Amino acid sequence: MLFLAGVGVLAGAMNALAGGGSFVTLPALIAIGVPSVSANVSSAVALYPGGLASAWTYRRQMEGVGGLSLSGLVAATLVGGLVGGLLLIGTPVSAFNLMLPWFLLLAALALTFGRRLGAALRGFVQIGPGVVLPVQFALGVYGGYFGGAVGLMMLAFWSLFEARDLKELSGVRTLLVSAANTMATLIFVAAGAVRWKPTIVLLVGATVGAYAGARLGLVLPPRAVRALTLCCAYTVTAIFFLRAILAVL
């Protein structure tokens, strides 16, 4: 329990500083013997309150993106999160174990290149509201199913048609990530898939860590925070690829 509390503090601080908290909560739960699907479910539920708190903090900065209203984006993300949560509950543990390293790699790449790629492509790609809605739905599915770095994936996608500063999109990003997680969390709780004892310990730790991380963010150099987060992300991804290879052998 002390180990999980410490992991929760670290995850909460990571999410407050740069994102990627699930890179430590997920392997920690698996390390103590929680099956991978239940570990992903429990990790999402443990980090959920912190996301809600962030969304509430940004409540005065909410507006639509890409020519779509905020309500339309929320609706698409809610439905996507519902579908993603149902898909995760129905995924066999063995299949999820094979997919997990690839999801982690996708999330790590999003952390690394998402914002820059979106900004680079904006001058070559024209995207209208007809594309925004289905892609936002797909991001909601990913958020409900796995969720790693989904907020950065949203920012990367939006940067293809939005010239606004990324800080101006923080409010809608936190709201839509929470929307996907809301539906997924309801599905997970209803299905009885949450391991409550470790989840509550992580949740409390993450809440403390989120506050501490926000305070640290005022003094730590952004490049140092990003470098540490990426180091953690790629280390965990490499470990899970090795784990998957050994399981096959």
Image (cartoon, rainbow, N blue to C red):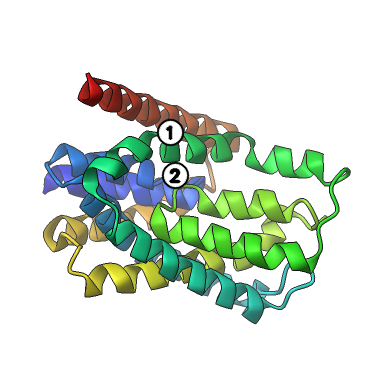
Residue 177, image x and y in percent?
51, 63
In the image, residue 223 sits, relative to residue 192, either above or below, namely above
Kindly state the secondary structure of the residue where label 1 is placed.
Answer: helix
Q: Are marks 2 and 1 in contact (CB under 8 Å)?
A: yes
**Label 2: how many residues lie within 10 Å, few (<14), some (14-19) or many (20+)?**
many
Name the residue tied to disc 1. Answer: 233
Disc 2 residue type (three-letter): Gly
- Residue 215, can we see it? no
Name the residue: 20% across, 58% down: 199
In the image, residue 94 sits, relative to residue 42, either above or below, namely above
Name the residue: 80% across, 56% down: 161
The alpha-carbon separation of the residues under discs 2 and 1 comes to 7 Å
- Residue 50, can we see it? yes
Q: Residue 66, located in which quarter of the rendered image?
A: bottom right
Looking at the image, the residue that sits furthest to the right is 123
Q: Earlier in the sequence, mark 2 or mark 1?
A: 2
**Label 1: how many residues lie within 10 Å, few (<14), some (14-19) or many (20+)?**
many
Kindly state the secondary structure of the residue where label 2 is placed.
Answer: loop
Name the residue: 39% across, 47% down: 21
Which residue is at the front of the view, 74 or 18? 74
Q: Is residue 93 left or right of residue 119?
A: left
Q: Is residue 21 left or right of residue 129?
A: left
Residue 235, image x and y in percent?
38, 26
Q: Which mark is residue 20?
A: 2
Which residue is at the front of the view, 215 or 87? 87
In the image, residue 82 sits, relative to residue 166, either above or below, namely below
Disc 1 residue type (three-letter): Ala
Which residue is at the front of the view, 157 or 127? 127
Name the residue: 52% across, 63% down: 140
- Quarter occupied by the C terminus: top left
Count of marks, rendered view: 2
Residue 108, image x and y in percent?
50, 36
